[in-house]
Image (tube, coloured by chain):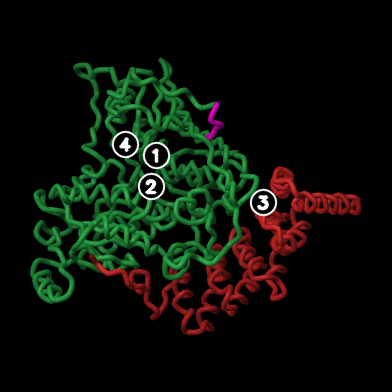
Chain colours: A green, B red
Amino acid sequence: MKKSNQLNRREFLAAAGAAAVSVPYLIPSGVLAGPGRVGANEKITMAHIGVGGMGGYHLNDMVERRDKGQVNIAAVCDIDKNRLVNALKTAGSGVEPYHDYRYILQRKDIDAVVIATPDHWHAVQMVHAAECGKHVYVEKPACCTIEEGKAMVAAAQKNKVSVQVGSQGRSQPEAYLAHRYLVNGNIGHINRVDCFHYPSPEDDNPVPDSEPPAELDWDMWLGPLRWRPYNQRYCHGTFRWLLESGGGQIRDRGAHVMSCAMWWMGADGTGPVTVEATGTAPKKGLWDSAVLMDVTYTFKNPDWVLTWRQMPNDKLPKAEERTGNEPGGKISRPGYGAIYRGDKGEFIHWGGDGGTWAEKKAREWELPAGGKDVYKSPGHKEDWFKGIKTGAKTIMNIEAAAGVANLCVLGNLSYILGRKLEWDQANQTIVGDEQAQRMMSRPQRHPYHL
Amino acid sequence: MAQTADTARGQGVDELIAGIKSAGDKERTEAWQSAGEVGAPAVKPLAKVMTDNDLEVARAAKRALWKIVRYTGRPGANKERRAVETELVELLGDDQPVAVRREVLWMLSEIGARNSIKPIARLLRNEGLREDARMALERIPTKRAVQALKAGFEKAPEDFKINMAQSLRNRGEEVDGYPCQKLVPTKKTDVKPL
């Protein structure tokens, strides 16, 4: 389906007349603003796909915006009936519930979708939404395979939709301060960024496979993944700790911390030439992502090194003492962040997601006359809304997000295969390793495919 | 000399299986992580343990088998890879449990070559395994795999032709009819709006 499949004004008026007798559809903003764009003063009409976990957060956030008159919420969708019922209670009347997100994509009155399903659904649903002309906010990590990332980029570009990926660290107030501090050479030329994170968990309560609960559509939860029996330790939330779906801390938080690194290093659109990972496997249970992990990404032209380390808690850098009056407040998640190493000094930040905390020297540094300022996000959702209304590139656009996801994916691939990988950024492929090349994509179950 | 090497490999397999069957989490983990170099001789013994009643033992055996697949798939190890492929293909037979065969199909999707195509294609006729077989063939980057998909499409029952068409299109083939269903909604909810 192409963008041209969206209704024009005349078609909309005809369709609206027919629809008025059934569902109280909202006027699609794009009809009033011109093809694909929402007018500057018009409300964007939203639908939420996946409304548990982060999806619940996004829905609550959007309800607040709706109540302030900023957006409309037309629909919510989940394959877990309990979650869907709860989402309806949150969203209130006038919001249509769906089990199958594709009904939402068929609705012409919906401008944009927020996708907060498990990671293995992100690419498929984003591509489908783009193909139906919807603007997309999709949770991180963008994708689970290299080929999924390519498909997401292609779909967004072809269909000219605005995509924001949920690595919201880039939009935090202290991320702006850190970025500005670093690009003005305060620690000199940066040749190394060391990301740190506490370990991925081990399953301390493994259980046998069982029948799925009645409220859950297990087949559709699995979606593109190969079929396997339901297991209580492999579903909402816990999918993060399996390599095939969540990919462990490196893909979960790596998509935040390494997103900041790529942004601040001006490295969006670039990639490493080699990736080498080691790690320790869980000793029991279903979860198989690396508990401790050590990944080295080597970049060339310019030359720098990025590392990702999941380390024991007692090895983590000590968090800065704070009063709580700083732009980002107190550091509530000190267990991850990154150390930037330059030839004139070092800089550290904690967090990198919804909480991003920059070291004091960056917060207190003032931009001198002639200094280089950087883009200051108005907020991650506001930045997306701007993209929808103006066509401006979002701060965590799909090209950048797929690049960051590639780092996470390649790190896990090197760990799984137990060998160093060579990466060809220009051609977006692994070099000289046929098995690794096959693993750049993963065949998907019918009909849940790109 | 050859006999000595065979004996050493046999001991390696015995030690591996003993480690996999160990009651200790640490011992099992060390065992499956060391499986890569044991290679092809361990494939069938490990497959037997994959259905052990002890979940952790079964899981360790599966992980050991995957370790072998990932190790022998490395560049420059064609002879080892082929030996493992040969062993894996023999595990696709009807005498093997479905869970083992499904896992083996995905292993062959990573390292399978010419010798895997026919045995995988045969499973396109097995209702419980045909979807995994289709995906395994789709991933094997050879013309023979595409030919097998085409032949599978021709012979497929009507309800599976659409799946086969999906694979063929993903491999760049044109398919008449059986249009893509990915955007067609099918599942309604009984939850009512407030």
Do pointers 1 and 3 mark residues of a single chain? no
Determine the image quadrant of residue A186.
top left
Residues at badges 2 and 1 in contact (C-beta under 8 Å)?
Answer: yes
Chain containing mark 2? A
Whether the residues at callouts 4 and 1 have beta carbons within 8 Å, the answer is no
> Do circles 2 and 1 both sit on a common chain?
yes
The structure residue drawn at horizontal position 47% and vertical position 62%, both measured from the top left corner, is A222
Look at the image and give the residue range highlighted in magenta.
A310-314
Q: Secondary structure at mark 1?
A: helix
The answer to the question of whether label 1 and label 3 lie on touching residues, with beta carbons closer than 8 A, is no
Q: Nearer the viewer, mark 3 or mark 2?
A: 2
Residue B83: in sight, yes or no? no
Q: Are marks 4 and 2 in contact (CB under 8 Å)?
A: no
**Amino acid, disc 2:** Lys
Q: Give the labeled residue for mark 3.
A: B67
Secondary structure beneath dot 2 equals loop
x then y, percent, for residue A223: 44, 64
Q: Which residue is mark 2?
A: A140
Q: Residue A256's mark?
A: 1
User: Which of the numbered marks, if any, corresponds to residue A56?
Assistant: none
Is A29 a magenta residue? no
Mark 3 neighbour density, 10 Å: few (under 14) some (14–19) many (20 or more): many
